[in-house]
Image (cartoon, grey):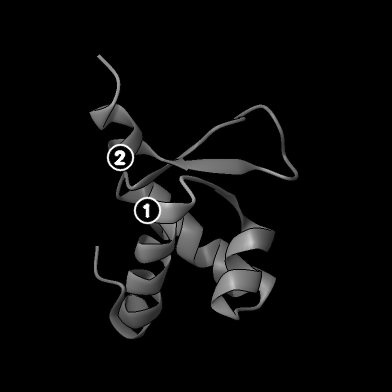
Amino acid sequence: MNLGARAKIGRELLSLLYSNIIIDTNFAAKKLGLTYPRANRLINDFCKVGILAELNKAKMRNKKYFFKDYVLLFMD
């Protein structure tokens, strides 16, 4: 997947994930200076390529996401 114009902000989100492995859309929007819809689209793109995964799939609101591959490094 190509993030195109969002590549720069995508790198910023990736950097943020190394210090905050569990995030939600509000947190990402605040830390990256984005609107909620823009942060949500970016997070959804990260989920589509497998960088993020939903932590609480049953909920429709207040979803939490985790940095999947990073977490898997520490699991056996």
Which amino acid type is marked by label 1? Tyr
33, above or below 14, in the image: below
Q: Quadrant of residue 7?
A: bottom left
Measured from the top left, where is residue 71 in percent x and y? Answer: 35, 33
Q: Residue furthest right?
A: 61
Q: Which residue is mark 2?
A: 70
User: Total of numbered circles in the picture?
Assistant: 2
Q: Quick one: label 2, few (<14), some, or many (20+) residues within 10 Å?
A: some
Task: Tell me the number on the disc at residue 37.
Answer: none
Q: Which residue is mark 1?
A: 18
Q: Residues within 10 Å of mark 1 (few under 14, many from 20)?
A: few
- Give the secondary structure at mark 1: helix
In the rendered image, residue 48, in percent from the top left (x then y), is placed at 37, 49
Q: Can you say whether 38 is above or below 61 in the image?
A: below
Name which residue type carries label 2: Tyr
> Residues under labels 2 and 1: Cα distance?
8 Å
